[in-house]
Amino acid sequence: MSSPLISEQPRPTAAADTPETRKPSADGRDPFFDNAKYLAIVLVAIGHAWEPLPSGRLVEAAYTFVYTFHMPVFILIAGYFSRNFELRPDRVWKLVTSLLVPYVLFEVLYTLFERATNRPDFPLTLLSPYWLLWFLPALFLWRLSTPLWQAVRFPVLVSLAIAALATVSPAADGSLQIQRILQFLPFYVLGLRLRPEHFQLLRSTWVRVVSVPVFAVGLLVAYWLVPRASTSWFYRKSSTDRLDMAEWTGPTVTLLLFVAALVLGACFLAWVPRGRSWMTTLGTCTLYGYLLHGFVVRGLKYGGFYDGPFFDTMLGTVAVTLGAIAGMTLLCTPPVRRLLRPLLEPRMAWARQKPPAARAS
């Protein structure tokens, strides 16, 4: 079973089996996507590890640059592998056990963690996801909406309109981080519309060559933006009302960030290794790294790890970056998955109602 953050990969079709295509493994998985998942989750860990660092323009620029595309890439891949999702009882039950059950479990665990390390009065509420846990209910709701996006005309444009309207709707700032779910929705819908040939195009040599100067320009733009724009836009979790901005800025920024995420995301995917390697197996365990690394980052922050003057230097930033890469890699290893699989990927057959035919017999 693959990580629930990305649904199981379908077996490749003959149309996708070209001389330039990565050879799938014996179980039909395409190593390209597992590699992409691993690299994307490493960027997530790096971004979270940078958050407690002392503010500096270079760090802020790198942080802004990474936050422009790392979650959009992850969500787009999730949408791509949700194309065949159907509202059947077995598929919905798998969503419940792989997303909602871990969400409830880790809400409790992170609440206890906060009470023990930072705030003894930290509240437990399932309607206000803890920090990084918002993605689990978001993916649950996106997957449930899949049949709608497969039926409506111009789904990407419709989802973009919804995301733009959400930015001027203060009511979306409430429970379950609906604001963030709606603003990231277009990337999921776009993933539903993609086909193998679109990813085949990214493997072209000219795309990889062009991506280098594009990345350089992106970093320069991020450096220019740091003193001129709020990083809050890149979290996509607040309306213009909460950010105290004019309403017209919300839809405008939504469109600009969507385009920027697509361009930088394409450049990122162009450099993802295509063949099976040491990172391929790690890419199947991204749920574990995603849910567990928050304990490490927040634990170090609350323990005063970032308070030393060393972390106000470039060398300190490099050390934190390497530590984030090593930590996330460790948390995505098979031994961690084997140890925690009963908690993060429970079968829960005892709680599932039998089909009507089975009950009748």
Image (spheres, rainbow, N blue to C red):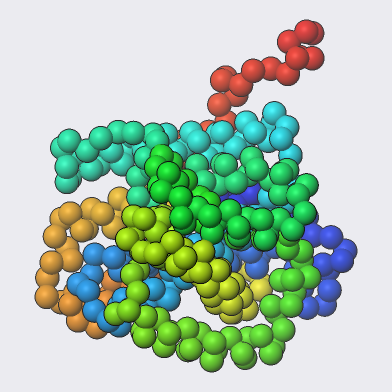
Q: Quadrant of residue 260?
A: bottom right
Which of 275 and 38 lies nearest the eye of the viewer? 38
Q: Quadrant of residue 16?
A: bottom right
Q: Which residue lies most toward the right here?
A: 14
Tell me what residue is drawn at x 77 percent, y 54 percent: 153
* Left or right side of 357 for 231: left
Tell me what residue is drawn at x 74 percent, y 77 percent: 201
Q: Position of residue 109 (x, y in %)?
A: 32, 38
Tell me what residue is drawn at x 58 percent, y 86 percent: 211
Which of 134 and 281 lies nearest the eye of the viewer? 134
Q: Position of residue 111 (x, y in %)?
A: 28, 38
- Is residue 65 depicted above or below 332 in this figure? below
Q: Position of residue 72 (x, y in %)?
A: 54, 63
Q: Position of residue 63 (x, y in %)?
A: 36, 73
* Left or right side of 3 for 43: left
Q: Quadrant of the C terminus?
A: top right
- Is residue 78 depicted above or below 144 in this figure? below
Q: Quadrant of the N terminus?
A: top right
How many marks are shown on the rendered structure?
0
- Is residue 212 depicted above or below 17 in this figure? below
* Left or right side of 237 for 198: right
Which of 59 and 11 lies nearest the eye of the viewer? 59
Q: Is residue 134 visible?
A: no
Q: Quadrant of residue 238?
A: bottom left
Q: Is residue 204 visible?
A: yes
Tell me what residue is drawn at x 54 percent, y 59 percent: 164
